[in-house]
Amino acid sequence: MNAASPIGVYDSGVGGLSVLREIRRELPDEALMYVADSGHAPYGDRPPEFIHARASAITAFLVGQGVKAVVVACNTVTGVAVEALRRQFSLPIVAIEPAVKPASARTRTGVVGVMATSVTLSSANLLRLVGQYRPPGGVAMQACPGLVEQVENGDLSGADTRALVERYVKPLLDAGADTIVLGCTHYAFLSPLVEAMVGPSVAVIDPAPAVARELRRRLTESSLLAPGGRLPSVRFFSSGAPDRARAVITQLWGQPVDVEPLST
């Protein structure tokens, strides 16, 4: 492991591409490896033991590929398994989490809404964040079953996706939320739809840029920033059907990609 080694990024599926996108903007010289566990997505209603096992296996795979750091681009994994990963592996592990702190600082009505999976909403990590940064009007939490599957299928604006987003946004607006946190990386690809529905008076917060900044800080601290002037590479792996994975990742990444099979 050295400064020229790649960074590994992992999600339950393709949602973490929203984090990978921000990492590429923040750290344009870094080589990247992305693992989409789409063959086992969604994680949102999986038991903790399953999530622990998948997170450990995929992190071990990335370590075996020689990465210098791992980014957990899945709120569900962060909430359930990231502390165990940090005990198990010695390299830097940066994890995404719902942006409750900045949302609480930004709200005017005093009510923050969080859209997330059921497992994330019940996780000790989110409950800690809410307890520590709870705004005056409280945090309205909304489980969003079905949204991950829509993004995994590449349906970002169809009638079914719009209907689901409207169903999940309405209770948050009814509760008085003027700031909505996207608590799942898949939802970042639906942010244009969410923003159109809530209007300009409601802020929609994606924590991915903060993850990229924290990754830069950790790499700088460890003297692991890549040297400049390189032509950085990106490798994609998926446990899902290869042709489907290639089509969806190409759509969301914005350019044609090759996707290698993940057998872990």
Image: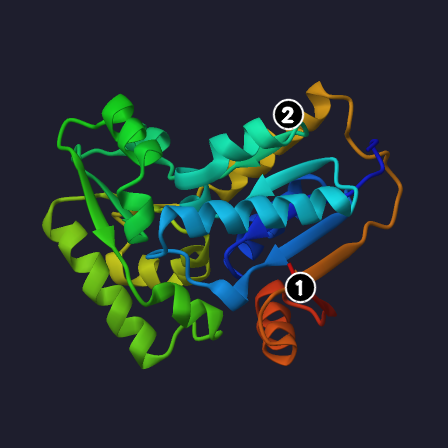
Q: How many marks?
A: 2
Query: Three-letter amino acid code at disc 1?
Result: Ser
Q: 80 and 68: which one is in front? A: 80
Q: Earlier in the sequence, mark 2 or mark 1?
A: 2
Whether residue 132 can be seen here: yes
Left or right: residue 33 versus residue 138 is right
In space, the residues marked 2 and 1 are separated at their CA atoms by: 32 Å
- Residue drawn 64% across the image and 25% down it: 217
Tell whether label 1 touches label 2 (CB within 8 Å).
no
Q: Position of residue 127 (x, y in %)?
A: 27, 32
Tell me the quarter of the picture where residue 124 sits.
top left
Foreground: disc 2 or disc 1: 1
Residue 263 is labelled as 1
Q: Position of residue 209 (x, y in %)?
A: 53, 40
Q: Compared with residue 29, is residue 165 higher up or lower down, i.e. above or below?
A: below
- Residue drawn 30% across the image and 72% down it: 162
Q: In what element is the residue under mark 1?
A: loop
Q: Residues within 10 Å of mark 2 (few under 14, many from 20)?
A: few
Residue 160 is labelled as none
Tell me the quarter of the picture where residue 137 sits.
top left
Q: Check the picture and name the quadrant holding the N terminus.
A: top right
Q: 38 and 147: which one is in front? A: 38
Left or right: residue 65 versus residue 60 is right
Q: Compared with residue 206, is residue 93 higher up or lower down, i.e. above or below?
A: above
Q: Position of residue 97 (x, y in %)?
A: 42, 38
Q: Position of residue 65 (x, y in %)?
A: 77, 47
Residue position for label 2: 217
- Residue drawn 64% across the image and 39% down it: 70
Query: Three-letter amino acid code at disc 2?
Result: Arg
Q: Residue furthest top?
A: 221
- Residue drawn 47% across the image and 69% down it: 152
